[in-house]
Image (cartoon, helix red, strand yellow):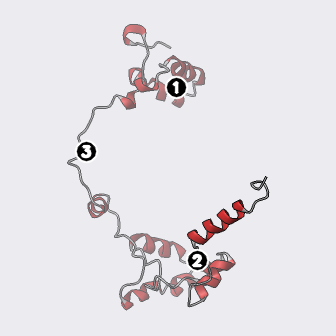
Amino acid sequence: MQVDVENNILINELQLGEKLGKCIHNDRRADFSLLLAMLTEDVREHSQFNLPIIDNENICIDEQELRKELNLPNKASLVIENPSDLSRFNQAKKLIDKNLTAIHLEDALQPKASSFYNDAKRISSKVLSNTPLFCQTKYQSDENNLNKRLTFNAKEWLAGIESSVVKSPLLTA
């Protein structure tokens, strides 16, 4: 194997061209290991850190532009907004015909809403059953006063500390 490298110093993988790829493709592990070992140990000199600087301040692409450019469908909404959208969930015929591929394809092309309800306070029973008992009780009670804030009078607390220190037998001696 012959490596033509300028100045006989191998700094980064760009100097090797396609040699690393060919070593992998031809299953020449020893040559691949040798070439990697010959690269400089200073990571700052690797080619990905020497790329030209591009001014990214002027580039402002929003989600809709990216979806259009990459031919992606609209983002799936979290809740059903129109009652007519409920008909899209009627997949019984496809399921009976064992046409799961059509269901997956339809969902990929036109994503369905994630939830039927638009109520932030409604939690599914499956989710609620996986929460600790305290959370379940707090959710089911109308008044969220299970964990009331305790009253604290700092002046009385300090007065109690002061009186116990004054009455301490260690100070009377």
Task: Report the residue at 28% width, 58% height from top.
Answer: 69
Q: Residue 56, which numbered label?
A: 3
Amino acid type of the residue that numbered disc 3 sits on in the rendered structure: Asn
Give the distance between the C-alpha atoms of the residues marked 1 and 3, in whole angstroms: 36 Å
Residue 121 location (% of width, % of height): 49, 84
**Sequence order check, earlier mark of 2 and 3:** 3
Disc 1 residue crowd, few under 14, some 14–19, many 20+, Cα 10 Å: some
Please state the horizontal and vertical placement of residue 165, each as a whole percent of the image: 70, 60
Occupied quadrant, residue 82: bottom left
Residue 53 pos. (x, y %) = 27, 34
- In the picture provided, is 93 more to the left or to the right than 83? right
Foreground of the two, 130 or 164? 164
Q: CA distance from mark 1 to mark 2?
A: 73 Å
The residue nearer to you, when weighing 134 against 50, is 134
Which dot, 1 or 3, sits closer to the camera? 3
Per the image, the residue denoted by label 1 is 23
In this rendering, the answer to whether 124 lies above or below 20 is: below
Of residues 10 and 104, the one nearer the viewer is 10
Q: Position of residue 104 (x, y in %)?
A: 49, 72
Q: Residues within 10 Å of mark 3 (few under 14, many from 20)?
A: few
Cα separation between marks 2 and 3: 54 Å
Tell me the residue that label 2 is attached to: 151
Front: mark 1 or 2: 2
